[in-house]
Image (cartoon, rainbow, N blue to C red):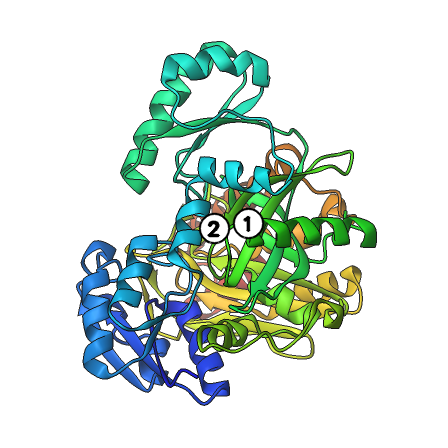
């Protein structure tokens, strides 16, 4: 088994991994940039080391420094969390070459699934259904010529991409040239690779993913599905498990396909196979995320499996502690991502200091966070502040608990997505489970409530104040009521205006 794990990450996911290490009796080592020196994950780790200045290129993306620190402090393994270097096959190989244990899938699996076109070819050989699309390595002219046969609308997608970067929707052949140019440029900047491919856009489809776990002894299981259709710019905002659109038969079928996709690349550790589920109940392979997912807590809540602990056990050479027959869904779980963004201003990032903080508690409520009172929210990192997860016996109860927990969640000093989530929990279509990946564009409006009313109230108040001052001036000039009486009238008026 492992003994000392260096966590190559920050914030809430570093805290999550620390807790799993503690539960297994393992020491944990934290890294921090100059901007993160006061973070909770730094204070609560067994050891902590400075990795560099705030920019990620000089700190959390410095794989050479991370490996050197692991060797210096005597760590025997590195857990990357998600983001940063989590899906970097070269870094994973460098960790292994340094004599350390990589807590994640084998580098070869990361490479095959990290290149979206290779991933499609690999899983197709295993009989996994694919969204119609193009092969890799085609020129712009070849992609433009092929597009009509795939059918519009379609997506131009980065071959090495993810998270919506290097992705553009195209609705007619006339828009192909601009979309290809933009997608290639964005993909080059984000991934250092400007290769793109085409994929049919399934209008009205759901985003449903299947969590898998695999050990080094050939055991691969799935932990059922998650619904991730509530997205903005291809970034997930709300996740839940199970999906309202998946029955037992479809669950078993999707799970079997996810396991087949994992076995096709000799997968080990935790991973997620993502699908698009169309209106007719047909599903298609989208991609595989070769890492721990942000939304893994909802799966943990309904299955009782601690995914991070299983990752550590697998990396330490252990077999999975359960079989597929042991997996049972218990109730319903939902997760809201609390982001430092202003939902009333096109979700613009918000920075500043947290001047007030009170986290929700109670039965069926879980908060994964790495924030504290007085914390500075900087522009250097992802805007995720916390993940609020609720569990109930039914989807309705999970939503009701989420509404209560959101109401209890107090965070001031920066704008957050809490108002967005409150409004979503009250949305009738959401409550009915009528979801798809274009839900926000077609069925949701985040206009600030009552803005016109507030303007009218302000105008009326200003008029009353002006009238009061004018009347006081006349009375004083004519020797009217005393200043004390005027003061009393002013106080009474102020109370009414409040």
Q: Residues within 10 Å of mark 2 (few under 14, many from 20)?
A: some
Earlier along the polypeptide chain: callout 1 or callout 2?
Answer: 1
Q: Picture quarter containing residue 280?
A: top right
Mark number, residue 351: none
Q: Judging from the image, what secondary structure is the residue with disc 2 in? A: helix
Report the residue marked by disc 2: 465
Q: Quadrant of the N terminus?
A: bottom left
Q: Is residue 415 left or right of residue 36?
A: right
Vertical comparison of 63 with 431: above or below: below
**Figure quadrant of residue 425:** bottom right
- The answer to whether any part of residue 378 appears in the image is no
Closer to viewer: mark 1 or mark 2: 1
Give the residue at x 40% y 29%. 196
Q: Nearer the viewer, residue 453 or 435?
A: 435
Residue at position x 66%, y 75% from top? Answer: 322
Assign a secondary structure to mark 1: loop
**Pointers 1 and 2 in contact (C-beta within 8 Å):** no
Using the image as rendered, state which of residue 56 and residue 380 is in the foreground.
56
Give the image location of residue 250, x and y in percent.
78, 48
Viewer-side residue, 386 vs 114: 114
- Residue in view at x 21 percent, y 54 percent: 57
Q: CA distance from mark 1 to mark 2?
A: 74 Å
- Locate the C terminus and report the quarter of the image it occupies: bottom right
* Residue 379 vertical placement versus 298 (above, below): above
Instruction: Say left or right for 244 vs 184.
Output: right
> Could you tell me residue 166's position as x and y percent?
39, 34
Residue hosting label 1 = 264
Residue 78 shows in this picture: yes
Percent across and percent down for residue 286 are: 56, 40
């Amino acid at each position: 088994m492992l003994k000392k794990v260096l966590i190559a990450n920050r914030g809430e996911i570093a805290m999550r991994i620390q807790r799993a290490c503690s539960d297994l009796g393992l020491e944990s080592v934290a890294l921090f940039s100059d901007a993160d020196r006061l973070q909770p994950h730094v204070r609560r780790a067994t050891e902590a080391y400075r990795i560099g200045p705030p920019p990620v290129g000089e700190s959390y993306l410095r794989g050479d420094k991370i490996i050197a620190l692991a060797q210096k402090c005597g760590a025997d393994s590195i857990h990357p969390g998600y983001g940063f270097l989590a899906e970097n096959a070269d870094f994973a190989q460098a960790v292994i070459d340094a004599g350390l244990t990589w807590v994640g899938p084998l580098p070869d699996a990361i490479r095959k699934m990290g290149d979206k076109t290779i991933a499609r070819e690999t899983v197709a050989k295993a009989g996994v259904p694919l969204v119609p699309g193009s092969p890799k390595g085609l020129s712009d002219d070849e992609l433009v010529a092929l597009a009509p046969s795939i059918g519009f609308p379609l997506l131009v997608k980065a071959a090495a991409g993810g998270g919506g970067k290097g992705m553009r929707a195209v609705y007619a052949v006339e828009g192909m040239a601009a979309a290809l140019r933009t997608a290639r440029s964005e993909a080059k900047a984000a991934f250092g690779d400007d290769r793109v491919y085409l994929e049919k856009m399934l209008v009205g489809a759901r985003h449903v993913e299947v969590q898998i776990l695999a050990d080094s002894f050939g055991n691969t299981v799935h932990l059922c599905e998650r619904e991730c259709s509530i997205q903005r710019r291809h970034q997930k905002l709300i996740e839940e498990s199970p999906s309202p659109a998946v029955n037992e038969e479809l669950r078993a079928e999707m799970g079997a396909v996810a396991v087949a996709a994992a076995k096709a690349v000799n997968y080990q550790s935790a991973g997620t196979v993502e699908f698009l589920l169309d209106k007719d109940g047909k599903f298609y392979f989208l991609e595989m995320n070769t890492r721990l997912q942000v939304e893994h807590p909802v799966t943990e809540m309904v299955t009782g499996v601690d995914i991070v602990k299983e990752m550590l056990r697998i990396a330490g050479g252990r077999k999975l502690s359960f079989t597929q027959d042991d997996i049972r869904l218990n109730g319903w779980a939902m997760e809201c991502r609390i982001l430092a963004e202003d939902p009333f201003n096109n979700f613009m990032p918000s920075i500043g200091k947290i001047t007030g903080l009170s986290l929700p508690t109670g039965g069926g409520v879980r908060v994964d966070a790495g924030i504290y009172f007085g914390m500075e929210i900087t522009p250097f990192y992802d805007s995720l502040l916390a993940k609020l997860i609720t569990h109930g016996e039914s989807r309705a109860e999970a939503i009701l608990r989420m509404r209560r927990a959101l109401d209890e969640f107090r965070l001031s000093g920066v704008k957050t997505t809490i108002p967005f989530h409150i409004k979503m929990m009250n949305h009738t279509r959401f409550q009915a489970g009528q979801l798809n990946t274009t839900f926000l564009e077609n069925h949701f409006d985040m206009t600030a409530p009552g803005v016109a009313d507030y303007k009218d109230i302000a105008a009326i108040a200003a008029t009353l104040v002006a009238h009061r001052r004018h009347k006081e001036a006349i009375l004083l000039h004519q020797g009217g009521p005393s200043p004390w009486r005027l003061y009393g009238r002013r106080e009474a008026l102020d109370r009414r205006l409040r």
